[in-house]
Image (tube, rainbow, N blue to C red):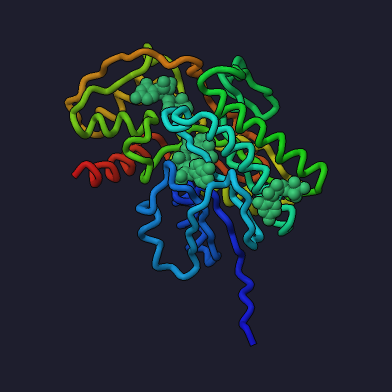
Amino acid sequence: MKNYNRNNKILITGGAGFLGSHLTERLLKEGNEVLVVDNFFTGTKQNLAHLLGNPNLEVMRHDVTFPLYVETNQIYNLACPASPVHYQYDPVQTTKTSVHGAINMLGLAKRTRARILQASTSEVYGDPEVHPQPEEYWGRVNPIGIRSCYDEGKRCAETLFFDYNRQHNLDIKVVRIFNTYGPRMHPNDGRVVSNFIMQALQDKDITIYGDGQQTRSFCYVDDLIDVMVKMMNSEKSFAGPVNIGNPGEFTMLQLAETILKLSGSKSKIIHQPLPSDDPKQRQPNIELAKAKLGWQPKVNLEDGLKETIAYFKKIVG
Ligand code: NAD
Ligand code: UDP
Ligand code: UDP
């Protein structure tokens, strides 16, 4: 007789990307079966290379804008390019990925009765007038700008999650992720941490967009994965949305100076034009995550950057 396997069967869309590959590693370590579904737009097989020998891992090339019929009892929906450079490359596909992707994954969750978690974003707050941002804040998003394909796509995905919850009683979880960094960010990813580190390690100019006074709050990847898994396994009545990130807030100038100091680089800072709709400030209010999930980040910016610089040093050689 077949030996029925009662392990968790977890689907991760976007599992070959930066966050997805760390999540895959964590869930395999905990003894789960993991199915990664990815179209490899920004993710790479290299991100999963060290895990490919694990018999509990299956990797499938698939675009979530098309239907997907598999069996699963938990879905982490991470598929979507996260860097402005990448999500603006094919903005229509970006919106399709968030919206059609959410519909397909929610349809899959409905058929299999799986619990489903959406990787939403601080971008739902746009360029915020409320600081720091609590979950109750509805945000200030330009609906027709160059960032809208990402911001509005993610907002619509949240709407779909809550409507499937109300209409079909689906077991949903929504996390709003703030800027996260760490090893396995793509070296040409275009986001600020990878750009500055790659530039510093190659003694190239550090490109600050605008005057560098805009702020972001940076969370180290290990802290983020901890809370994402906690949220997935939290009590059913808590659907979110919940902010997850590190409240430590820095200007881009401070970030550049810290990376220059930690890498011992001779690079000089230059200024380039600020892209349109670039949010001026961003900092999560994480009181809800603390109260409901008993979580707060542990890794400070300097320690996280040291790990990340060490990773990029290996790539640069
Ligand atoms: P990433 O670009 O490294 O990973 C995204 C993954 O999704 C890649 O592997 C990519 O190939 C895949 N993908 C893209 N479109 C797809 C499609 N149509 N079908 C299947 N796969 C597709 O980005 P990341 O930083 O790992 O982000 C993961 C998720 O977390 C994204 O949904 C992103 O919006 C969200 N998020 C990340 C951050 C952050 O700071 N890293 C912040 C907020 C939200
Ligand atoms: N879907 C999927 N996998 C499944 C079930 C559904 O990809 O296992 C897709 C299907 O293409 C559908 C979408 O999810 O269009 C939404 O499904 P739902 O059941 O909500 O809607 P309907 O099938 O009635 O359009
Ligand atoms: N940024 C910068 N130089 C770069 C890349 C980004 O000054 O080489 C700035 C960007 O304008 C923004 C901040 O850094 O103000 C964070 O940008 P990122 O693309 O990492 O993320 P997001 O804007 O989506 O938070």
Left or right: 121, with 238 as reference point: left
The residue located at (58%, 21%) in the rendering is: 126
- Toward the bottom, the furthest residue is 1
Residue 266 % position (x, y): 17, 26
* Residue 173 against residue 108 in the figure, above or below: above
Where is the N terminus found, in terms of image quarters?
A: bottom right
- Closer-to-camera residue (106/69): 69
- Closer-to-camera residue (224/207): 207
Quadrant in the rendering for residue 290? top right
Residue 119 % position (x, y): 58, 41
Residue 122 % position (x, y): 57, 30
* Residue 18 against residue 8 in the figure, above or below: above
For residue 25, say whether it is visible: yes
The residue located at (53%, 60%) in the rendering is: 35
Where is the C terminus found, in terms of image quarters?
A: top left
Left or right: 59, with 200 as reference point: right
Residue 226 % position (x, y): 53, 49
